[in-house]
Image (tube, rainbow, N blue to C red):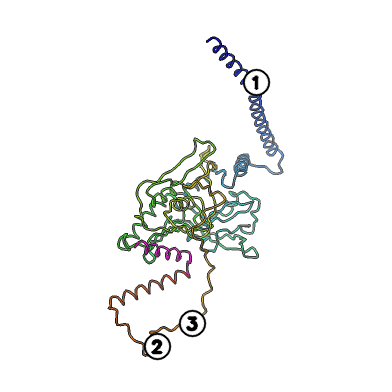
Amino acid sequence: MKKYMMAGVAGILAGTLISTQFAGPLLAQEAEKTTNVYEQLDLFGDVFERIRAQYVEEVDAEDLIEAAINGMLSSLDPHSSYLSPKDAADMRVQTSGSFGGLGIEVTQEEGFVKVVAPMDGTPADIAGVEAGDYITAVDGKSIMGMTLDDAVELMRGPVGSEIIVTLVRAGVDDPFDVSIIRDTIKLTAVRSRVEGKSIVLRVTTFNDQTYPNLEQGLKDGIEELGGIENVDGIVVDLRNNPGGLLDQAIKVSDAFLDEGEIVSTRGRNPEDSTRVNATPGDLAQGKPVVVLINGGSASASEIVSGALQDHHRAVVVGTKSFGKGSVQTVMPLRSDGAMRLTTARYYTPSGRSIQALGISPDIVVDQPPRQPEATEGEDTPKFRSEADLRGALNNDSLTEDERAKIEEERAAAEEAAKLRDEDFQLAYAIDLLKGLSKIGD
C-alpha cells in the first residue's frame, strides 16, 4: 500500500513540476502580448495628438476618433462599421419600414460601392438602377477609396432633390450617369396578388412589417380565390431583396414549415451558437411553394430560400443568390452611437454555409432582356386553324357550359403568355405551380 501511495505522491510532484515549467513561458507570452497592445495604444495616442497639433488645418477631435473607430471596424469585413448617432437613428427608422433616400441596398467590394439590390418602387428602381451595378461617382465626385458609410452619406440629401450617380454595369462598355430624385422611402414589406390560381407574395425587405404583411397577403389571396382548395400554390418572390431582420426571416420560413430546423448561427465561441426550429402550423396548408431568387437576394432572403429548399418544402427558381452568410449584431455605444459587428455565420438546416457561395436554385431560370416593343403597323404572322377554313364542320359534341369552360381556360393561358413577356421568371414559377397542382390532383 505504501508503494502505491508514494508513486501517487511522486506523480503529483512530477505533474506540479511540469505544470510550473510550462506555465512560466505561457504567462510570459501573455504578458508580452498585453505590453504590445498598450504600446500600440500609446502609438495611436501619439499619432492622434500630432494630427491635432500639426495637421495643415484644424480638425475636430470627435471626427478623428469616429474615423479611427470606423477604420478599425471596416478593416474586418464589408459589413462591420461604426454608426454615428445620426446613422444609428436612421437605421432604427429603416427597420421600422419608412426612411428617406434613394431606395438601394449597397455593399463594398474591393474598394468599390456595389448595388446589392434596388427596392421595388423606389426612386433608384424607377430610374433603372440594377442589382450588380457599381457606383463610381456621386454628382461628379468620385467615391473611389471612400468608406461605405461616407459614400452612403454622400448619397443622402433632402427629399425632392436630384442626385446624379455614375454607374458601371456589366455588358455596358462605358460608365453612364443616372438622375435620381430623392424621396421618402415607404416600404410595403410584402405585396400580394393573384395570378391565375396562384398567390404571388412579393417580399421586398425584412423589417418589422414583413411577417404581418405576408400573413395578411396570403389570407387575402386565399379569400379572393374562394378558399385554399382553389389555390394551385404560392410564389414567394425574394428577387432583389437585400435582407434585413433575422427574426423576420425566421418567421417567414416558419410560416411554411411544420417542424425541423430553420437556421443555425455559429459564433467565435461554441457557447454562442444558436439553433432555431420551426413550430407547428403551415399557413399554405401544404400547397406547393416556389421561391424566386436572383443575384440581388441576400442575407435574410437566403435564410428563407435555404430553409425551404433543404426541407424540400419549396422549389427554388431563378439564379444564384448574393452569398451573404454572416450575422451582424448592432451594439449600442455611448453618445447614442452604435457598432455593427459581424458576430456569427449562419447555416441552412443541412449545415451549408452560404457565405460567398449563395443559394443555388433547383431550377436555373434567367430573366431574358426585355424585347423592344413591335412598331406600329408591323405585321405579326397569323396562323390559320381548322375553324378558319370555309365549310369546316362544327363541334357539336360540347355543351354550352363545356364550350364556355374551354374558352375561359384559353383566355387564362393567353393571359399567362402575356406575363411571360413581362416577367419570364415569375411566369415560369406560376406554370410550375400549375403543373405541381395537377400532379397533386
Amino acid type at circle 3 is Pro
Quarter of the figure with residue 197: bottom left
Find out whether residue 250 is within the magenta segment: no
Of label 2 and label 1, which has the lower sequence position? 1
Looking at the rendered structure, the secondary structure element under dot 2 is loop
* Image spot of residue 360 (x, y percent): 52, 55
Q: CA distance from mark 1 to mark 3?
A: 92 Å
Q: Are marks 2 and 1 in contact (CB under 8 Å)?
A: no
Amino acid type at circle 1 is Gln
Mark 1 or mark 3: which is in front? 1
In the image, residue 110 above or below residue 175: above
Amino acid type at circle 2 is Leu
Q: CA distance from mark 3 to mark 2?
A: 17 Å
Query: What residue lies at 45% left-to-right and 64% top-to-bottom?
Result: 426
Find out whether residue 437 is within the magenta segment: yes
Of label 3 and label 2, which has the lower sequence position? 3
Query: What residue lies at 40% left-to-right and 51% top-to-bottom?
Result: 211
**Residue 54 shown left or right of residue 189 in the figure:** right
| Residue to which mark 2 is pinned | 389
Range drawn in magenta: 421-441
Of label 1 and label 3, which has the lower sequence position? 1
**Residue 382 shown left or right of residue 53 in the figure:** left
Numbered circle sitting on residue 21: 1
| Residue to which mark 3 is pinned | 381
State the residue in front, 174 or 141: 174
